[in-house]
Image (tube, grey):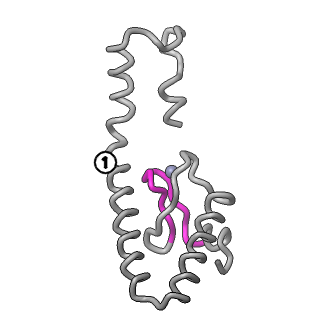
Amino acid sequence: MLWSAISTPTHDGRPTGGSIPRDGDRVDRVLRPQVPGVRAAFAAAVAQEEARAAVLTRLAEAERAREVTAEATRQAKLQSMGPCPAGYAWHREGGGWRCNGGSHTLSAGAAAAILGDA
Ligand SMILES: [Zn+2]
């Protein structure tokens, strides 16, 4: 979506690739509004990974290994059966999941259908 927005021909049909300042303005106009959402999603993903790491340190080694494997399985299923259209990984948000780019969500029901009991 982002890439097509950048590479779409101009309104008068000329292909993009004009002067550098003009393209720079266009890139800035397209990308800058996305910054807050991406920043918030990355912050949420980092906070969640830190919380998960804290939980893992409290688990016994065998239980920790089981949990690491289970999370890797969940992420692999999400990437293959419900990938973010922009290619980001997923983190939990509420009962569902949000991509680390911040623009896409999976409802709890959709995630359950993908993950089964993983
Ligand atoms: Zn996404």
Quadrant of the image containing the C terminus:
bottom right
- Classed neighbour count for the residue bearing mark 1: other residues with Cα under 10 Å, few (<14), some (14–19), many (≥20): few
Residue type at mark 1: give it.
Answer: Pro
Position of 81 with respect to 111 (left or right) is right
Query: Element type at marker 1?
Result: helix
Position of 39 with respect to 72 (left or right) is left
Q: Residue at x 55, y 62 (%)?
A: 106
The residue that label 1 is drawn on is 36
Q: Identify whether 98 is placed above or below 51.
A: above
**Which residue is at the far bottom?**
60
Residue 74 on image: x %, y %: 60, 70
Q: Quadrant of residue 52?
A: bottom left
Q: Residue at x 67, y 68 (%)?
A: 114
Position of 72 with respect to 61 (left or right) is right
Q: Toward the viewer: 51 or 39?
A: 51
Q: Is residue 105 magenta?
A: yes
Q: Toward the viewer: 22 or 49?
A: 49
Q: Which residues are magenta?
A: 96-109
Q: Toward the viewer: 92 or 59?
A: 59
Q: Residue at x 68, y 60 (%)?
A: 81
